[in-house]
Structures are given as C-alpha cells and as structure tokens.
Amino acid sequence: MYRIGIDVGGTNIAAGVVNERYNIIKKKSIKTAENSSPEAMIKAIAELVKELAIGLDDEIESVGVGVPGTAELDTGKILYANNLGFEDVPFLPELEKALGKDLSGKVFFENDANAAAIGEYITGGYNEPVFVMVTLGTGIGGGIIINGKLLRGCNYAAAEFGHMSINIDGCDCNCGRKGCFEDYASASALVLQARAAMENDKPKQSMLWERVETPDQLDGELFFEAVRKGDKTAKEVMNTFSEYLAEGLTNLVNILQPNVIVLSGGITRAADLYLDKVKEKVARDVYSRSSRINTRIELSKGVSDSGDVGIIGAAIIGDF
Ligand SMILES: [Zn+2]
C-alpha cells in the first residue's frame, strides 16, 4: 500500500508517493504561484495526485496535505492562511470532491508545520513521550507530539511558537503583538539584524560590506561567511541571535519539558556557528537546570531535505 503526501509551500507544491517504510518512491512538484487561488490549487493538487497514482491505482491508501495556516479538522476548512491569502476555504470537502469517490473518506489535511513535525518524528525514529520541533524560516513554526499524538489545541492552532512574545516592549509583529519570538529568532529576523548592523557600521569596516553595495543585498549565506571569517560585527549579530533563540527555547522547555527539541529550517545548516551557545544558555536558564534529565536540543535529521519531511508527514497525518 502507498500513501500520497503533499506539502503546500510558499514557492512549490511538492507531492510524493510514500511506501510503508516511509520512503518517497515518486515525486513531483509544481509552482504555487501558478495555482494560487483556492479553486486552482485544489484542482492542481487533484491532478498531481492522479498523476502520481498512475500504475498504483488500487494501492493508494490515503492522501494527506500539509497546508500553511490553520487547518480546522472538524469542518475541513482552512480558516486562515496568511501566505496564501486564504480565509475560510472549504479545502478538504472540495479536494475530496475533485479526487473522486475512490478516495472518499481517505483524504486528510493538517497545518504544514505540524505535518513536518510528524515526518521528522517518524523518520527520525524518535520514540519519546514529549517531542517538539521548531522550524526557523521566514517565521517560526513547529509541532508538539505527546505520547505519539499531535497536540492540536482546541482551535487546531497549537504550537504557534513564533507568536510567543519574548519582549513586551519589542518590535511590532504581524500578529498584532509586540516582541514575538519569530521577529527575533527566525531566519528572516537574522538577516534583518545583520542588515541593521551594517547600517550602524560607520565607516564601513565590516566584511558584511565586502560583496554588497547596500544592506538589502545581504543574504544569509554572505552573513554566515562573514561570521566564519571572524568579522566582529557579524559575530556580534550572531551572538545576539543565539541569545534570542535560547530565550524562546527556554520558554518551551519550561512549559513542556520535552525530551527533545529538534531545530529545522535552512539556517540550521550553519548551526555550528550558534548551536553550542544556544544550548549553554538554555541549560543555564531553564527552571529544571538541576534536574537529572535535561531536554536535548538537536538538529533535524531531515531525510534528504526538509521538503521530504513535509511530504512524508503529510502522507501519514491520518494516523495522528
Ligand atoms: Zn506575533
């Protein structure tokens, strides 16, 4: 038997056929922008599923989709998806209709960060009571799995770690609060912090200026390169960032006492530049610092890339 998983991202809609050993045996992706209205997206996903199912017709056990935003499981609606501009979209019933009666009752959906957490939990072989994944990207998302079950919360919007404030006098967040974790410790926040440091670097002595003319041309790669070369300004930004990240993770440890927190997202490829500092600060600050067991902070094992984890997680959400 096979299951089909679909990960709806900001850039691509990635789909794959997943076998019983959680391997992706077939994959295809299309551009999100070309299928951005709810109707077009549902139609495109149905076509992807049909294409991937060719030759496996009777063996598709289920179809699962990870969507950005709040997936209201009891109504099948996407309540709000900021990045897609969706509000109150009857996603699941419409997708079921588009897929036809063979798959009726076998179609599932879930928030994409939750789906990725499930993918990581299963493929990474974590068999522990409290598992938390924190994804550092444009924002900060994640998932909480307790005793093998996803914690969804009463409105299916649990684990919005990014909107936990770490500073009530902090910067304005798009959610309406101030000082949200993701405005300090996401990948995007890091780049903004580095650009702000460039603005303050007068005369332009930092290596951050070496290959760009204006701060907005600086990206994560160039920033990490400057940290590696020992640039003082870049290292200061990196240090402050690790403190912000540690602050939010400490809150999560204090509330949930996870066995493990897994960090994922593109910037974890440069984690050698900040992870030790983060771990040290968390260990120093957590309430349970003198306890026998301490939360491990690890990097995503990520299969081959984070997209795969999203596809695999989406494929098996029906079990969670
Ligand atoms: Zn916020």
Image: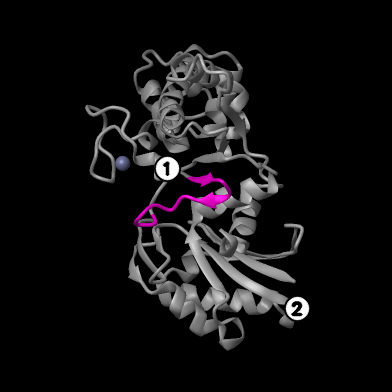
Asked whether residue 284 is in view, the answer is yes
Q: How many marks?
A: 2
Give residue 102's position: percent from left, percent from top: 62, 86
> In the image, what residue type sits under mark 2?
Leu
Give the quarter of the figure containing the N terminus.
bottom right
In the structure shown, which secondary structural element does the residue marked by tag 1 occupy? loop
Query: Horizontally, is 303 left or right of 180 in the view?
Result: right
Give the quarter of the figure containing the C terminus.
bottom right
Q: Judge whether 89 appears above or below 167 on screen.
A: below
Foreground pick, 166 / 204: 166
Does mark 2's beta carbon lie closer than 8 Å to ligand 1? no
The way the protein has been coloured in the rendering is one colour
Query: Horizontally, is 59 left or right of 220 in the view?
Result: right
- The residue to which callout 1 is attached is 139
Q: Residue at x 36, y 71 (%)?
A: 89
Task: Count neighbours of disc 1 (C-alpha within 10 A) and say few if under 14, some if 14 to 19, many if 20 or more.
Answer: many
Magenta stretch encompasses residue 211: no
Q: Residue at x 44, y 36 (%)?
A: 186
Segment tinted magenta in the rendering: 143-156
